[in-house]
Amino acid sequence: MKLPKYDENAKVRPTDIVGRSGTEARKIDFSDIPVIDIGAMLDGDDAAKAETAAKVREAAINVGFFYVKNHGVPEDVIETARSTAERFYALPEDIKNRYDVMKTKRHKGYVPVGGLSADPSIVDLQEGYEIGLELPKDDPDYREGSALLGPNVWPEELPEFQSDIYRYFEESMELGKRLYRLFALATAMPEDYFEPMVTKPCAQLRILYYPETDPKDAKIGIGAHTDYESFTLLWQSESGLQVQNRAGEWIEAPPIEGTFIVNIGDMMMRWTNDLFVSTPHRVVNTSGKKRYSMALFFAANHDTVVECLPTCHNANHPPKYPPTHFGYWIENMHSYSYAYRWDERGHLPDPEEAAQELLARRSG
Ligand SMILES: [Fe+2]
């Protein structure tokens, strides 16, 4: 498959990743990726929440990845979604292809092998299914042609896919909102700071399937990249996720029962002036089994302007980035990674200019 030319000098482009080549990773040391109990966000007092936020802050600064336990998502919801996803990917190709995002040109539905290149120079060996907030056909953003906001596309041949996967989406969105509160506290902002920005988020749940490959000849399942949104919540059935630590080495991030993995995305990095880092990662399915994962890319409302938080800059550390537009940042990044949007690369609104326009309109 021929990938389009990638302009490395473009103003808006994905994060450059060092050490892209190879598939090796170091086995995890106990302390490399911390496991944080976030039960306090469900029923804790302010002191317990502050203690949890301090751990999140440390992990977000030092690693960019952490596991969360006592997360509040019922295990049966996760297990039901996983087994339904497994049945979907076992469907014949011609059925799955009926829901191809190439046909809908919206960010909902099936993405076959060849449809995604998270590292714009590699075709990923995985299939995916994209789900977002369920909105009606007369939703104003959808009617204006938004690729990110609108009704979902559901496979008729597997009716339980809609109910089981959407239940998982809703539960993981609730967890995402608890995490936003935690990130607010971790940056010394009011706990509800992000709440007005997530009333209609263009958050995206991607249900993934990585075919089994010979572990001795494992292929890149998803190429090295950073996530574009605020943070990602990942559940995975098998090992395969590799995370690049600040020393530039790849380390394995295997599944741990009863947990999700959380990683910082590009927009949280900008909000925090690089205090929290959007960490490069990739997947190499070395498990020798079929691998399933469910990744919720927790974004914010499309028209959110991401500006350095007041607690993350001072006279000695001015903001490193100009304000940017959340929705257009994601759309530009999608034009690098999703084949169905390649022809829009370089033609979408510049997120920094769009942010300036919005700020001018809001102040005037
Ligand atoms: Fe990712």
Image: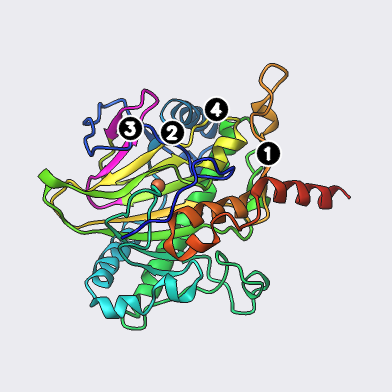
Query: Residue at the spot x=21%, y=35% of the render?
Result: 24
- At mark 3, the secondary structure is loop
Q: Which residue is mark 1?
A: 307
Neighbor class of circle 1 (other Cα within 10 Å; few <14, some 14-19, many 20+) is some
Residue under the point 43% across and 40% down:
263
Q: Are marks 1 and 2 in contact (CB under 8 Å)?
A: no
Looking at the image, can residue 91 be seen? yes
| Residue interval drawn in magenta | 236-251
Write down the residue under mark 3: 19
Judged by depth in the image, the label closer to the viewer, 2 or 3, is 3
First along the sequence among labels 3 and 1 = 3
Q: Nearer the viewer, residue 76 or 354?
A: 354
Q: Earlier in the sequence, mark 2 or mark 3?
A: 3
Q: Secondary structure at mark 4?
A: loop
Which image quadrant: the N terminus?
A: bottom left
Residue type (three-letter) at the residue carrying disc 4: Leu
**Front disc: 3 or 1:** 3
Q: How is the image coloured?
A: rainbow
Q: Are marks 2 and 3 in contact (CB under 8 Å)?
A: no
Q: CA distance from mark 2 to mark 3?
A: 18 Å
From the image, tell me which residue sits under label 4. 275
Q: Nearer the viewer, residue 85 or 146?
A: 146
Residue 46 is at least partly visible in this image: no
